Amino acid sequence: QVQLVESGGGLVQAGGSLRLSCAVSGRTWADYNIGWFRQAPGKEREFVAGIRWNSGNTNYVESTKARFTISRDNTKNTAYLQMTSLKPEDTAVYYCAIRRSLVGSFDYWGQGTQVTVSS
């Protein structure tokens, strides 16, 4: 069993920044992917960014690539999503998730953290 706990959400003005954290604990694997997703009201959940834990290789959805940065700290077993130049359309609940494989569905999810960007 793997546990993921997100933190760092909140209310920020447009143009501001936030850093989300995803603390990973439990019985993880030798290597895995962490993904950040978001779900805005009335919309489907969408992938935002992902990172392969050991290599640090990253991938992003095109719409956030220039403004968001995913990273991880091996010593803290924590992944981060640094968000800059935030826009009202970035308002959503942000989730982190983990999977063992390079592709496919994610195995475990966090509870989510709310990000609200005011105009």
Image (cartoon, rainbow, N blue to C red):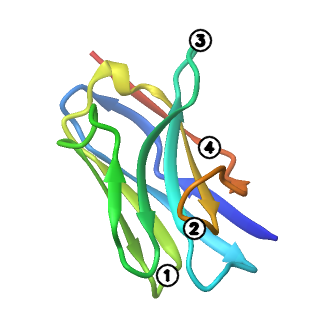
Rounded to the nearest whole Å, what is the CA distance between mark 1 and mark 2?
Answer: 8 Å
- Residue density around tag 3, few if under 14, some if 14–19, many if 20 or more, within 10 Å: few
Q: Position of residue 49 (x, y in %)?
A: 40, 49
Q: Position of residue 53 (x, y in %)?
A: 46, 75
Disc 1 and disc 2 in contact, CB within 8 angstroms = yes
Q: Characterize the local packing of mark 4: few (<14), some (14-19) or many (20 or more) Cα atoms within 10 angstroms.
A: many
Q: The residue tagged with tag 4: helix, strand or loop? A: loop
Badge 2 element? strand
Quarter that holds the C terminus = top left
**The N terminus sits in image quarter:** bottom right
The residue where tag 3 is placed is 42
The amino acid type of the residue labelled 3 equals Gly
- List the residue tagged with mark 1: 76
From the image, tell me which residue sits under label 4: 112
* Amino acid type of the residue that numbered disc 1 sits on in the rendered structure: Lys
Q: Residue furthest right?
A: 1
Classify residue 88 as left or right of residue 50.
left
User: From the viewer's perspective, is the residue at label 1 or at label 3 nearer?
Assistant: 3
Image point (61%, 66%), residue name: 101
* Mark 1 element type: loop
Please report whichever mark, 1 or 3, sits nearer to the chain's N-terminal start. Answer: 3
Closer to the chain start, of discs 4 and 3, is: 3
What amino acid is labelled 4 in the image?
A: Gly
Residue pointed to by mark 2: 23
> In the figure, 54 relative to 99: above or below?
below
